[in-house]
Image: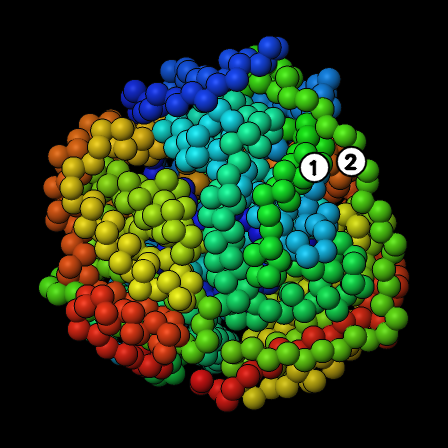
Amino acid sequence: MMTATRGVTAVGMEEEDAQQYSAVMIIRPLVALACSLSLLTVVPLAQAPQAPATITVPYTEFTLANGLHVILHRDPTVPVAAVNVWYHVGSGREKPGRTGFAHLFEHVMFEGSEHVAEGQFDSWLEAAGGSNNGSTSEDRTNYVTDVPSNALELALFLESDRMGYLLPTLTQGKLDGQRDVVKNEKRQRVDNAPYGQAFVELTSMLYPKGHPYSWPVIGSMEDLSAAQLDDVREFFTTYYAPNNASLVIAGDIDIAQTRTLVEKWFSAIPRGKDVSPLVTQPVQLEGVVRRTITDRVQLPRLYMAWHTPAFYAPGDAAMDMIGGLLTGGKNSRLYKRLVYDLQMAQDVFAAQQSSALGSTFLVVSTARPGQSLEKIQAVIDEEIARLQQQPPEAREMMRVLNQTEASFYRRMERTAGFGGKADQLNGYYVATGMPDFFEEDLARYRALSPADIQSAAARYLPATRRVELSVMPATPAGK
Amino acid sequence: MTAMFMTRRIRPLIVCALALAAASAVTTLRAQGPDRRQPPPLGPPPALRLPAVQKGTLANGVPLWLIEQHRVPLVQVNVLLRGGSSLDRAGRYGMASLVAAMLDEGAGSRSSLELADAVEFLGAELSTSSSVDYSAIRMSSPVRNLDAALPLMADVLLRPTFPANELDRLRKERLTALVQAQDNPAAIIGYAFPRVVFGPAHRYGTPATGLAPALTAITPDDVRAFYREHYTAGHAAVVVVGDITLADAKARLDRAFTGWSSTAGAAPTAAPIPTAPQLTRREVVIIDKPGAAQSQIRIGWVGVPRSTGEYAILQVLNTILGGSFTSRLNQNLRERNGYTYGASSGFDMRTSAGPFLAGAGVQTDKTAEALREFFVELDGIRKPVPAAELDKAKNYVALGFPAEFETSRDLAQKLEEMIVFSLPDDTFQSFVGAVTRVTAAEVQQAADRYIRGDRMAVVVVGDRKVIEPGIAALKLGPLRVVPVEEFFK
């Protein structure tokens, strides 16, 4: 899943370590990461002294008459309230000629609404000690507003005003201003980033024209230029209705008072028309799709990609674990061979990129100076074939599973921000209807057997149906 | 501690009139809805509840600082070694970073791979790294596996084997990363800007990871000698955060770290590196990147050390200038002009004075315009700051402060900061009050002293053919064009 965000990139002080995949958004969708706790019930399993604890996240949920679904979770560790809204619309809903629009729209959402003059959304929040951000993926758009707990009502006022009353004060200037910002976001993240073009190519290689995932979230410069005020109005009216959104408030809150405040600020927002589910035909590659592009880089990089099961569908967790078996840690199969033993590659990365309509499994590796992508690809093919022919060792599986479990705990420590508990509760709710899906999610991994891994590798990583993209240096080394 | 100033950082709690400039009320009061003409008033700010820091000492005299945190069944154990890349001697810049990276490439009876397997099998994470002021071995472990994980950490700290083949492997990896960095304007500027401000001799003029000549020259004996000299108990401190008590942590650490030398009679930590000479005139350096879609800009000079008495003032000052979304730089360059995805500024505070810098990636055809606006703001900040803007910044810094104490990682980082910079015990408690007391006059005086745009270095990585004429026409000062490779020598 690719995401594009609103946030400002801070000025880096010093490069401590090379960011190998700065251009590769390795982020697995937030939802996979886990839930939360604090008001966490930890129940040691009885049978084994080394058994992990189970986790539940208590929450309250209700739906307003206008269709807005609300989830509340109390965690008073720090006196902060996290207000988190997901609109169930992403770049997949964009029309032809308007790629990048969902994300451009996301930026416009911060520019004020009927009762919030331009600039005040940020000013009022900062004056209260709060912060905000937003991000857009193929499937959804999320907004995070984190405030000291005494400013919860301010955040709800601001969030509800742009949900209900964005259009009356919409201007051409707001749209044009953010259009320039978003174009610079694209220049920074894609056009001026080494290998930045690779993901633009991959989307078109993986998906047939017209498929919701066949264009990049950031869009094209041409389409960003073409966006009109009427597009903003239509998009808002169609997709930014309370019945197409879910709101999570987590942190140091009083549940009953918060419910009253939500009802006060959101109840009068009119319901919109129902949004029908995005339906697509399953996609399948009929053969190997190969492409070579050039970039202003010195080292060649190989990308291989396959279509894999959608987020939470059978096979999704197995593919996730295969990513860990191949490139998670020094002993993982591909890392050990390509980077550690043979030292042909500077890096290698493999992961399931889960999305709602269907996922992709991606393998990326950068050649060391003087090494060829052909040799690297041959090793990748060998290792995938080995996984297809023999089940992995039990210890290998356990190593990945133990890492997965520990990562679930680590990701439960933060309430606010992207990937915080509020965001995770919303993600789980959107994907499964169950905000507290932590144990169920982890259970998907615990249930995997070595044979499951072998059969998933055999079924989903065929050598005969996949995408192979090579990025080659455009000029001799050093230029 | 990384000094990133647009994101989260230290902020205290303040009790202050919120600068809610009278809500310009566009109206339409809806029949059944709430009154939206004014934003709702804020309640009293929540109290700052800082977790208690417990202090103890390991059997060999090493200080142990601990915060209990029982939300998740994990324990974070960080061993700090004072010094970091500040200890690198001339011709060997990159040594501390490479030594730290080598610690887990073989230790005790285990090879690099065996060690990684053992750690990962426990669901633990172990990392070794070095920054400017200190090196650290950090481990996070499920509490149930802590007794199995600590001996692995002890091997890494006390019994690294520094195999020659692993050194060669890491060296090649780092040399390749340096090749890759030269492809990336955002990375190039990270090498070029400090070099222009601090020069090749001063340690701050070269990234902690070092450059090819030194990396190539470092031998296994160099690594061992550096380790023996600097990884001693006398330079160490231990930070623990998690689901554990002080007594329990001390007992387990003493058991695992048996054989660690004593702090008694330890050599004093090396003297801090000298403050770099301040720049005296503005100069412009252009680094050509033909075809670049954006120009990476950094403007700055020598800033202040972490020990500055003006810490709170500078936090407020920088918040106004470029440390928040509504800061002047971001509002001007991003929101008003659309030249960039984001502009910011910050003081990178270290044991010695690190850089102050302002920067952005701006679209190529607006490079000169963007530079002009940078200087509008760098000059403008030396004029008195309006009261409402000052209040907003103070509140942003102060009221957002409690959020900085949530995760084990947050808390461990705070303890590391206190130890490495020898901060007073009440540093975090008193910060809120210090911010509350910052006045417009103090901000102006600090700006006058620390933000002198007319003497700063201006470093730009971009498409020279397109940007040079416009930059030259600004007549900012002497202009040099320097090849990318110069910054990697």
Q: Position of residue B208 (x, y in %)?
A: 34, 66
Q: Are marks 2 and 1 on the same chain?
A: yes
Q: Amino acid at mark 1?
A: Tyr
Earlier along the polypeptide chain: callout 2 or callout 1? 1
Q: Is residue A426 above or below residue A176?
A: above
Q: Is residue A136 above or below residue A466?
A: above
* Mark 2, residue position: A275
Q: Position of residue A103 (x, y in %)?
A: 60, 48
Residue drawn at the location 20% of the way across and 27% of the way down: B437
What is the basis of the colouring in this image?
Answer: rainbow
Residue drawn at the location 57% of the way across and 14% of the way down: B30
Residue in the foreground of this view, choosing between B309 and A61: A61
Residue ranking furthest to the top: B31
Q: Position of residue B168 (x, y in %)?
A: 48, 80
Mark 1: secondary structure: helix
Q: Is residue A211 left or right of residue A369?
A: right
* Subunit bearing disc 1: A
Residue drawn at the location 45% of the way across and 72% of the way down: B292
* Subunit bearing disc 2: A
* Mark 1, residue position: A239
Q: Quadrant of the C terminus of chain B?
A: bottom left
Q: Is residue A139 left or right of residue B389?
A: right
Q: Quadrant of residue B112?
A: bottom right
Tell me, yes or no, if residue B4 can be seen here: no
Q: Amino acid at mark 2?
A: Val
Residues at discs 2 and 1 in contact (Cβ within 8 Å): yes
Q: Is residue A95 left or right of residue B463?
A: right
Tell me, yes or no, if residue A134 can be seen here: yes
| Crowdedness near tag 1: few (<14), some (14–19) or many (≥20) residues, C-alpha within 10 Å | many
